Amino acid sequence: MGKVIINDQITERSEAVIDIEDRGYQFGDGVYEVIRIYDGSLFTAEEHLNRFYQSAEKIKMIVPFDKKQLRALVEQLVKENQVKDGSLYMQLTRGASPRNHVFPGEEIQPVLTAYTKEVPRPEEAMANGVKAIVVDDIRWLRCDIKSLNLLPNILAKQEASEQGCFEAIQHRNGLVTEGSSSNAYIIKDGKIQTHPATNLILNGITRQVIAKLCAENDIPFSEEPFHIDDLFNADEVFISSTTSEVMPVIQIDEQVIGDGKPGRITSQLQSLFVAKIESDKHNK
Ligand code: PDD
């Protein structure tokens, strides 16, 4: 089963205990991160940890470690679990105290937990592309926070799954925000377009890597909202996330995108992304 982190300790998973009144369990009162592990090392760890601290701050929680300590702790977990290609999940809740919506007093410490698992890269889906559906975005107005509250995302993803699709692409009044667990992009006439990093989306770390790769390689990239009609009429569509990387979308609802195969620019981005993974490994 491997080892896990509880607060500042690394322990066997079978020995880990969480209080039944942990606020993460009762209210979803906490934040999380998912970090990819390639060849035993954490990819874009600094960026994920920065967002973890920002998410915590946005919900008025203080991470009870400095960033260096936390990084050392999660790196130690990856090492002890001997993960090769996988992911690290970490979350911080507002701690355990008798159920009450109001924050507990300062004597209650936040609870940090983390675990790792082996996850292969989704090679086949990335090579062939995936299908998606379009759904209403029924989430709250602080989607920039990586909060534990994922019920609308879960409902959207479940609907996609029941329709044999990989992802649900969400929209507000016709404007596409993002996927249920990914960012969404269209490509039209050589230009990539995605929703700006406002309160309506999570500013994905993969999204930020993609924006940088585009800037370095003269690929036009614009952060402007687009309509679901633009989605259906795009030359190419893709989504991105820590676990899905750059994932081509070849069909949305009944509409085939482009010629139904991953497009040229999406494939180019996939190659650039793999090169970035490789170069980060060598820079360790
Ligand atoms: N999901 N938007 C949403 C709503 C997400 O949940 C995610 C990530 C992203 C992409 O962010 P990033 O590139 O930093 O992974 C965008 C993670 C992987 C998850 O919940 O499992």
Image (cartoon, rainbow, N blue to C red):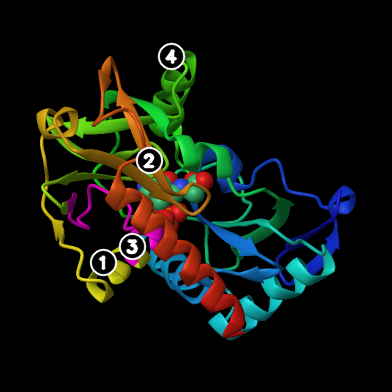
Mark 3 CB lies closer than 8 A to ligand 1? no
| Mark earlier in primary sequence (2, 3) | 3
Amino acid tagged 3: Ile
* Marks 1, 4: nearer the viewer: 1
Mark 2 CB lies closer than 8 A to ligand 1? no
- On screen, residue 157 versus residue 121, left or right, reads left
On residue 210, which mark appears? 3
Asked where in the image residue 6 lies, by quadrant, the reply is bottom right
Question: Residue 249 location, x and y as percent?
Answer: 35, 35
For disc 4, the marked residue is 163
* Marks 2, 3: nearer the viewer: 2
Answer yes or no: do the residues labelled 1 and 3 have beta carbons within 8 Å?
A: yes
On residue 214, which mark appears? 1
- In the rendered image, the quadrant that contains the C terminus is bottom right
For label 3, the crowd category at 10 Å Cα-Cα, with few meaning under 14, some 14 to 19 and many 20 or more, is many
Q: Is residue 206 magenta?
A: yes
| Mark earlier in primary sequence (1, 4) | 4
Answer yes or no: do the residues labelled 1 and 4 have beta carbons within 8 Å?
A: no
Amino acid tagged 4: Gln
Between 91 and 202, which is closer to the camera in this rendering? 202
Circle 1 SS class: helix
| Mark earlier in primary sequence (1, 2) | 1
Amino acid tagged 1: Cys
- On screen, residue 4 versus residue 166, left or right, reads right
Residue at 39% x, 49% y is 240
Circle 2 SS class: strand
